[in-house]
Image: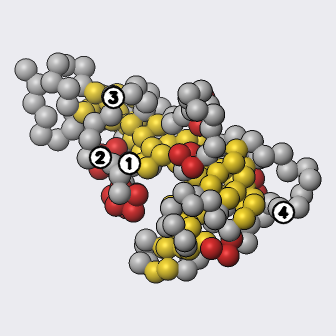
Amino acid sequence: MYTADATDKSFNAKYHARCYCGEVRYEVDADPVDVKICHCKTCRVLHGAPMQWAAIFHKQNVRFVSGTASLAFYNAEDNTSGRTLPCKVSCGKCRTLIADEGRNMWLAFPTLFEMPPREGVPEVLKPRCHIFYAMRVMDINDGLPKWAGHKNKSMLIEWCVYTCGLPRFRVPCERVGSVWCRVKSPGMVHP
């Protein structure tokens, strides 16, 4: 099911994750490709939270230590259970959401990673941006880039340079190509 072999002695786990009950355990032997906070409605509803924090790894860097027989799958696009990719992966016993599994990538939830108490989140696991921020249910003022949809494939939302605090968007400037220009969102009025 997953490409990393549980008996491979050359696999040097950097991160260890587990579900709430401990039935499902997995390891990752690389740093994430990216770390994002998703505000899309699907993630919010399935997590029962205002956003989802995901660290993205190549699937070949993930191996299960225990619990593969207990895994449950859900495909939100088709509203079906079963391992139809992409899908949500959870523990069939305690129902903890384990990850989002894509065709080539594994979107792990760092809250499941074993981290020493009071040391904080390692720098490589800290979010680098927000995606689907246009769908957010609450504002987050953390200085991270905020994309209206997918990263680098949608408008970048900025806070207004005026005192109103309303969001503004950055879009590729049509006249200059790769230079960014500021554009007001529809309906915004400034003094």
Q: Are marks 1 and 2 in contact (CB under 8 Å)?
A: yes
Secondary structure of the residue carrying numbered label 2: loop
Give how far apart the Cα atoms at labels 3 and 4 are: 41 Å
* Residue at figure coordinates x 63%, y 34% from the top left: 116
Q: Specify the quadrant of the image occupied by residue 43.
A: bottom left
Amino acid type, callout 2:
Arg
* Residue at figure coordinates x 41%, y 78% from the top left: 79
Secondary structure of the residue carrying numbered label 4: loop
Residue at label 4?
5
Q: Quadrant of the C terminus?
A: top left
Q: Are marks 4 and 2 in contact (CB under 8 Å)?
A: no
> Which label lies toward us, 1 or 2?
1
Amino acid type, callout 3:
Asn
Crowding at mark 1 (Cα within 10 Å: few <14, some 14-19, many 20+): many
Residue at label 3?
141
Given residues 87 and 92, the one toward you in this image is 92
Q: Earlier in the sequence, mark 1 or mark 4?
A: 4
Q: Earlier in the sequence, mark 2 or mark 3?
A: 2
Side of 34 where 169 appears, left or right: left
Secondary structure of the residue carrying numbered label 1: loop
Would residue 85 be seen by someone viewing this image from the given angle?
Answer: no
> Measured along the vertical axis of the image, is residue 8 above or below residue 128?
below
